[in-house]
Amino acid sequence: MRVGLLTGGGDCPGLNAVIRAAGRRVMTRGGEVVGVRDGWKGLVEGLFEPLGPREISGLLPRGGTIIGTTRTNPFKVDGGVEKVLDTFRNAELDALIAIGGEDTLGVAARLYEEHQFPVVGVPKTIDNDLSATDYTFGFDTAVSVATEAIDRLHTTAESHNRVMVVEVMGRHAGWIAVYSGIAGGADAILIPEQPVVYDEIAEALRKRHARGKNFSIIVVSEGTELPGLEDSGELDAFGHVTLSHRNVGETIAREIESRTGFETRVTVLGHVQRGGTPTPRDRVLATRYGLKAAELALAGEFGNMAALRGDDIVAVSLDEATAELKTVPPEWYAVAQAFFG
Ligand code: F6P
């Protein structure tokens, strides 16, 4: 059996660990592994890379993806879907393991549904916003990077009596903000799922300062809706609004400083959250996902995704996995709120 491996969307720590694990399992069962370069673009344009035992070794600690990634959506490319189907057939592939988030797996789900394309999925994203799995790999590393940053900002905030605003990624889900904010002891956490009222935040910080705590940490998720903030309307190939220029951190800092008079600084963590080596937890999760995806592909159980349920790795349908975004429920936010102000 010839199995293609593809990584799509934003990269994240653990992609190479999946490639290693899936590759190992396919090879030990007598199959062949082919890397599809640069996400779905590789299947539109026929970009391949043979992956043998040498190529897939030494990958566990390595960040990024050795086969490259793009945000190409074949459904938005002229004749893109036909090209994907032709390229796949011409390369004599029998199965594809697509490692990606909502967008990459959304394409996989449609190709399976509409063309019986032999694909299985692996849930990747630092945003942790995929339904049908408890966690995506990459999330733990992003939370760990953000938490370390918050810890470091704490000491300098305290020395200077400042408010520190930390902007984290997460797109339309506040998971990274909530987890790193709770772990780092943030005094306010702002996420897309919750409305923002500047006066309430300012009041909470004033009370805190009145108690003798002359510094504060505010964690804000990049996709947070702010009063008066209009999105530019710039869309990517999957129709998502580009969030990188929203400047939510700067806006909040300005509003808080003008209301409280407390000196405020901003740190935007950006792609640091996605780079570098995966945490042990992400390496293990990625490894388990890779093995499961290979088994599903070898058994011809297409249209499924490897998922974490409790402590078990199970198969769920790609349809279920991509039906809706998993956002932060109010009870999770309440855990964070218990420590605000
Ligand atoms: O989906 C992962 C993610 O890192 C989001 O958190 C972020 O909004 C987006 O990708 C950034 O995308 P890009 O790498 O294209 O700037």
Image (spheres, helix red, strand yellow):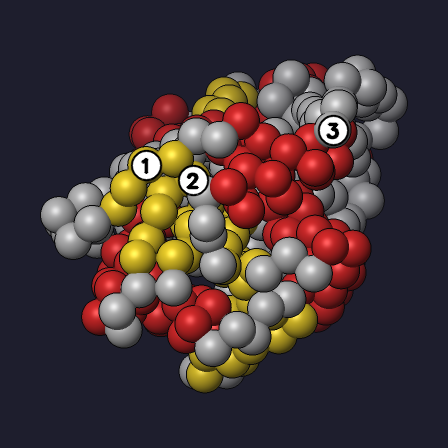
**Alpha carbon separation for disc pair 2 and 1:** 6 Å
Q: CB of residue at label 1: within 8 Å of ligand 1?
A: no
| Tag shown at residue 79 | 3
Q: Secondary structure at mark 1?
A: strand
Q: Amino acid at mark 3?
A: Gly
| Tag shown at residue 320 | none
Q: Amino acid at mark 2?
A: Val
Q: Secondary structure at mark 3?
A: loop
Q: Earlier in the sequence, mark 3 or mark 1?
A: 1
Q: Quadrant of the N terminus?
A: bottom left
Residue 265: % across, % down: 49, 21
Residue drawn at 74 percent across, 35 percent down: 75
Residue 158 quadrant:
top left
Residue 237 quadrant:
top right
Residue drawn at 41 percent across, 57 percent down: 3
Q: How many marks?
A: 3
Residue 41: % across, % down: 55, 30
Decide which of 311, 41 is in the foreground and name it.
41
Q: CB of residue at label 2: within 8 Å of ligand 1?
A: no
Q: Secondary structure at mark 2?
A: strand
**Alpha carbon separation for disc pair 3 and 1:** 23 Å
Residue 135: % across, % down: 51, 65
Q: Earlier in the sequence, mark 3 or mark 2?
A: 2
Q: Where 320 sits versus 181, above or below?
A: below
Residue drawn at 54 percent across, 46 percent down: 89
Decide which of 271, 116 is in the foreground and name it.
116
For disc 1, the marked residue is 49
**Alpha carbon separation for disc pair 3 and 2:** 19 Å
Q: Amino acid at mark 1?
A: Glu
Mark 1 residue crowding within 10 angstroms, few (<14) / some (14–19) / many (20+)? some
For disc 2, the marked residue is 36
